[in-house]
Image (spheres, rainbow, N blue to C red):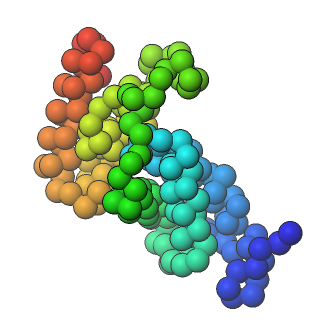
């Protein structure tokens, strides 16, 4: 079944810097998915926000300056979708409250994304964007609509919290 875009063309024909809509999803699914999971800490809810993010891309098809702009837009929309979901559904389950026997967590303690799940939301976002997505402070500030100094402070405090949680020397 082919999906038809509002403009009358097939969904696969919609291009973003030479990428079809499906290729954009394939390229950025890990980033958007991780942002949603980090924010909501609930798989089912994260899936909903993930789908809403890409649906918004499909519906609005905004003009982007470059691929970095597209990626930042997807992250910002994913965060907004998660925030909207949290406001609407205040009953989401925190990962710490889930019985660890019922969920397959990766055993690799070096995996930064799983270490971040134990931190408060404000530290999770900034540290994830910095370490997992390789964004610089200025870029994170733009995405999260915070000042660069605030981002630097959150990074410093987040590193300290990770160090305290995991007893490491360097984070």
Determine whether, in the image, residue 170 is placed left or right of residue 59: left
Residue 31 visible (yes or no):
no
Q: How many marks?
A: 0
The structure residue drawn at horizontal position 59% and vertical position 68%, both measured from the top left corner, is 55
Give coordinates of residue 32: x percent, y percent.
Answer: 51, 51
Name the image quarter holding residue 120. Answer: top left
Determine whether, in the image, residue 156 is placed left or right of residue 18: left
The structure residue drawn at horizontal position 47% and vertical position 41%, both measured from the top left corner, is 42
* Quarter of the figure with the N terminus: bottom right
Name the image quarter holding residue 7. Answer: bottom right
Residue 73 visible (yes or no):
yes
Give coordinates of residue 61: x percent, y percent.
Answer: 56, 77
Residue extending farthest to the bottom is: 7
* Quarter of the figure with the C terminus: top left
Of 113 and 95, which appears nearest the observer? 95
Residue extending farthest to the right is: 1
Give coordinates of residue 119: x percent, y percent.
Answer: 29, 32
The structure residue drawn at horizontal position 52% and vertical position 62%, both measured from the top left corner, is 53
Residue extending farthest to the front is: 91
Compared with 105, 21 (above or below) is: below
Give coordinates of residue 135: x percent, y percent.
Answer: 36, 46
């Amino acid at each position: 079944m082919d999906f038809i875009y509002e403009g009358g063309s097939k969904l696969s024909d919609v291009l973003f810097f030479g990428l079809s809509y499906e290729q954009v999803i394939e390229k950025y699914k890990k980033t958007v998915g991780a942002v949603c999971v980090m924010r909501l800490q609930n798989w089912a809810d994260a899936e909903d926000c993930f789908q809403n993010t890409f649906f918004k891309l499909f519906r609005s098809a905004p003009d982007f300056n470059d691929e970095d702009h597209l990626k930042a837009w997807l992250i910002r929309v994913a965060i907004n979708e998660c925030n909207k979901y949290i406001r609407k559904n205040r009953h989401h389950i925190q990962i710490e409250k889930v019985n660890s026997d019922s969920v397959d967590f990766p055993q690799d303690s070096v995996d930064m994304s799983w270490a971040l799940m134990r931190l408060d939301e404000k530290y999770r976002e900034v540290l994830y964007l910095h370490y997992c997505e390789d964004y610089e402070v200025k870029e994170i500030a733009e995405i999260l609509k915070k000042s660069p100094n605030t981002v630097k402070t959150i990074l410093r405090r987040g590193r300290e919290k990770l160090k305290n949680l995991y007893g490491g020397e360097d984070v």
